[in-house]
Amino acid sequence: RDAAWANSTALPKLVAAEFGTLDAPSGKTSPEPGAFGAAWTVSAWLVGLALDFDAFYRWTDSDDVDYADGRKVAFLYGWAWAMAVAELLFDETSTTTSLEFLETSLPIVIDDPAVARNATSVAGVATSTAAGRVLLVVAYDPTAYFGGNALDASLIVPAFANMTFYTLDTTNALYDRLWRDLNATGGLEHDDGHLYKLKKMANDDGLDYVEARLDEYLAFQNASLASAAFPGSVWRNDTHARLSWEMAVPSVSAFVLR
């Protein structure tokens, strides 16, 4: 784009349309609604920001689920959680042009494609808003679907007095919880170990199981959207602080420091 429009006073917008996953390794269509999909999505966002994309247009970000009395509720995909948390990066004083990239190990910086395809990547961005210093950090590995992996993470940040912390991994992502519950009760439509839209992931008995527990799952979803206790340690001096914690893979985390 930059070369083709080198003599233009304004570059055209660079966007990705219908962005997202299509087929899971099983060959079945999946929006990857769990923590894995959230980490994949945020990693791709950061690559897009590094390459000066202006926008990513997504597929549907949730499933509508019906109560017996006709009420509808939305079960958010993991990357919808990430979209909500990413809003913290921006306000009237902060835009994508003010983002600062943290030190990264994204696969795009690995020369060997075979290594890059199966590498654990850690990446993040930071910005300053009226609410404070905001950081978004992601850990992704294409081979770590249901979690169980972790790495030691550390960030050096300007000194702060208070922290608000948000995180999503396979332990608190709604669709990972749904898969575990359906797997334990014989409610899965497929036994291939992958997550799908609810009506494709659950068989008839599984749908009945979930619909009988909608309040429980909504409470679980709401808890995932709330701030959490930071699971690591904070070292401070007069000007800076070091955040150290065990970062689940896959996961997405956000910090608001003020």
Image: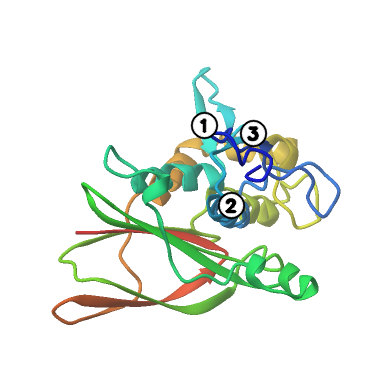
Q: Earlier in the sequence, mark 3 or mark 1?
A: 3
Q: Residue at x 34, y 76 (%)?
A: 232
Q: Judge by depth and name the residue closer to the eye, 238 or 153.
A: 238
Q: Residue at x 43, y 42 (%)?
A: 84
* Left or right: 79 in relation to 132: right
> What residue is drawn where x is 67% and y is 63%?
145
| Callout 3: SS | loop
Q: Amino acid at mark 2?
A: Leu
SS at circle 1: strand
Q: CA distance from mark 3 to mark 2?
A: 21 Å
**Which residue is under mark 2?**
51
Q: Earlier in the sequence, mark 3 or mark 2?
A: 2
Q: Measured along the vertical axis of the image, is residue 249 above or below residue 88? A: below
The quarter of the displayed image where residue 209 is located: top right
Q: Is residue 77 above or below residue 101?
A: above
Choose the circle earlier in sequence order: 1 or 2.
Answer: 2
